Amino acid sequence: MPTAESLLPRPALTSPSLLAATVASLGRSAVDRRDLWRLLTDTYTIDLDALAAVLPPEEPEPVWLAARG
């Protein structure tokens, strides 16, 4: 069951510069990238495509081949 707080309207971040400033501000208190996403989506209504454009790309870990013996 949703909490009463989640039914309140959240401010929308539509400006790319405001979104970037908010990401920088919340990024200082976030533990990792997943925590940053949670903080943003819990606090604001955001365009996920705009947010993905602002965040630096996350490179996948390389998969190393086993050495032949």
Image: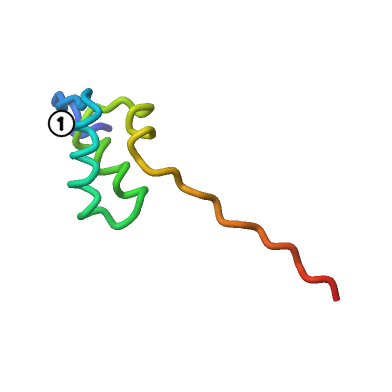
Residue 55, given in percent of the width and then of the height, sits at 35, 40
Say above or below: 26 vs 12. below
Residue occupying the point 31% across, 25% down:
47
In the image, 2 versus 29, the foreground residue is: 29
Picture residue at 68% right of the left edge, 62% below the top: 64
Query: Which residue of the protein is positioned furthest toward the right in this rendering?
Result: 69
User: 62 or 44: nearer the eye?
Assistant: 62
Residue 13 in the image: above or below residue 42: above
Q: Name the residue: 24% across, 37% down.
A: 20
**Left or right: 4 with respect to 51?**
left
Residue placed most toward the observer, 43 or 1: 43
Give coordinates of residue 42: x percent, y percent.
Answer: 23, 37
Residue 5, x across and y down, in percent: 14, 33
Q: Which residue is mark 1?
A: 4
Quadrant of the image containing the N terminus: top left
Q: Position of residue 32 (x, y in %)?
A: 34, 55
Q: Is residue 65 above or below residue 38?
A: below
